[in-house]
Every structure is written in C-alpha cells, then in structure tokens.
Amino acid sequence: MSPYKVGASRVPHRGRHGTKAGTLNLLRELAQDERFRCLNSRARDVLYTGVLLHADADGCWQVRRAIWAEECGWKCGGQTSPPWIGEAIRAAKGCGLL
C-alpha cells in the first residue's frame, strides 16, 4: 500500500495534523522513491505541491483538482481543472504512488 493517498470522496478529510518536520520527511521520502523519479516533471511538481500544501501526518490529503491546479500555477479562476492534473494523478496511480 502506498503512503500517499488522495481522497476522492466529498466528505472532508479529518486526518492527523502534520508538522513541518513531518512534511519535510514526506517530501524526502517521495524524492527518494524510484517510482517518483520515473514520472515526468509536471507530474512530480503536482505531487510535490499536494504533499507540501495538503498532506497530513499520514501522507493523506483531499483537495479539488481545480484548486490543486491553481496551486501548481494554472490561472483560470476556478473553472474545470486542466487535463494535466488528471494525467499526473493517473501516472502516480499507475506506478503505485497514489
């Protein structure tokens, strides 16, 4: 089972609050994971942003794709998310990271 999980339900995620040190450790683990290195740079950026801004102490988070895209630099005022967010999620799921 992967330590990184993205919630898909509409129920708010109520995980354990993470610390700055815990988030840094999650990012280090992610960077050292061989599966992460196989992803393209955009997918890596999307995952880094998700962990950095939303992951709890267990590496879980739940965020709307449009908000996640805006946090990755996409500027379109909350409309539907761009296709590269879904592509990054599918790539991460395909290699077992999510």
Image (cartoon, rainbow, N blue to C red):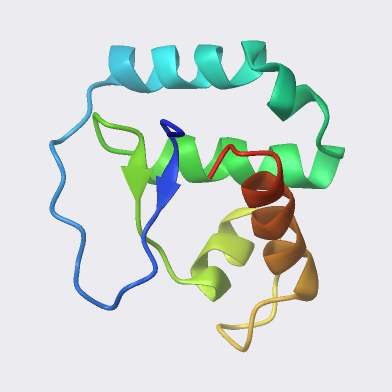
Decide which of 32, 93 is in the foreground and name it. 93
Q: Horizontally, is 63 left or right of 47 in the view? A: left
Identify whether 46 is placed above or below 62.
above
Decide which of 53, 96 is in the foreground and name it. 96
Residue 35 placement: quadrant: top right
Residue at 33% from the left image edge and 43% from the top image edge: 60
Whether residue 69 is visible here, answered yes or no, is: yes
Q: Position of residue 2 (x, y in %)?
A: 46, 34
Q: Position of residue 27 (x, y in %)?
A: 51, 21
Residue at 57% from the left image edge and 56% from the top image edge: 71
Q: Horizontally, is 41 left or right of 68 in the view? A: right
Q: Horizontally, is 95 left or right of 28 in the view? A: right
Which residue is situated farthest in the bottom direction here?
A: 79
Identify whether 62 is placed above or below 96.
below
Q: Position of residue 62 (x, y in %)?
A: 35, 59
Residue 49 placement: quadrant: top right
Residue 82 placement: quadrant: bottom right
Identify whether 71 is placed above or below 27.
below
Q: Position of residue 85 (x, y in %)?
A: 69, 64
